[in-house]
Amino acid sequence: MKLVSLNLRFGGQDRTDSISDYLMDHDADLLVLGEYQDNKNGLKIKETLKKEGFTCITSDDDLLGVLVASKYPYSLIRREKRLIGIELSDSKLTVLGVYVPTGSNDKRFKAAVWQKILKFAQENRNTPCIITGDFNSCTKDDSMNRSHYSADELEKLINMGWIDVWGRYNDTDSERYTWYSDYGNGFRFDYVFISPELAKTIDIKQVYHDSKKREEGMSDHSPLILDFKF
């Protein structure tokens, strides 16, 4: 099973075709796309995914949200602003796709989204579950200039037993940072976490950041790819 998590950057804009080609080339089973916009570009992405056998569902956002797509049948378990949760019908694997606000304009909104993520994580720590997307959060260790954003929330998630998959399992030379500021400072904002229950049975084949696509301008975030057996 392969999962690709990618921030589209303002819905994809004129990069929509290259984004769609990239997603199709990966032959993924699950997709989590942050900064999704339900406009002509968003509809184009959904049509492409539909033709490739995906079923798509989006969060309850007027502007920037998150899209989750699956080739496997699923049921919807959570849908609100910046969050969308599904449960795969056959394997009972739960996936929560997130696009956490930056907090630059509304810190309370970011804090509220994080509290919903932590509540979901607590409720699903004993089920096979993945939480992934653009968290717009990092610790000092994942910041080139040693600044940090919502580090306490990340620590709470890890203290519940959730595992930062790239941090634990990456065995490639993929770059650590997934987004860079205009000043050239790198940050790891994109994560995939697995529950303690899923960690008992999952077989991680590969997990990496595809920084080449960020450098080429497909997005301002590096795609995060997880290849696994469950």
Image: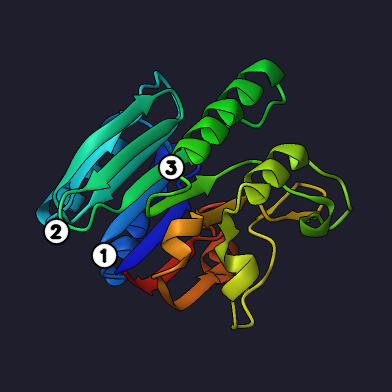
Q: Residue furthest right?
A: 146
* Residue 74, placed above or below residue 163: above
Label annotation for residue 24: 1
Where does residue 79 sit, x and y in percent of width and height? 34, 27
Of 55 and 124, nearer the camera is 124
Report how far apart the C-alphas of labels 3 and 1 lie in the structure: 30 Å
**Quadrant (top left/top right/bottom left/bottom right) for the N terminus:** bottom left
**Discs 2, 1 touching: Cβ within 8 Å:** yes
**Badge 1 amino acid:** Met
Report how far apart the C-alphas of labels 2 and 3 lie in the structure: 30 Å
Is the residue marked by circle 3 packed among few (<14), some (14-19), or many (20+) residues within 10 Å?
some
Kindly identify which residue carries mark 3: 124
Is the residue marked by circle 1 packed among few (<14), some (14-19), or many (20+) residues within 10 Å?
few
Which residue appears at 80% of the width and 54% of the height? 143
Which residue appears at 82% of the width and 44% of the height? 148
* Disc 3 secondary structure class: loop
Where does residue 124 sit, x and y in percent of width and height? 43, 42
Which residue appears at 49% of the width and 60% of the height? 223
Q: Residue 5 occupies which quadrant of the picture?
A: bottom left
Would residue 196 be found to the left or right of residue 30 on screen?
Answer: right
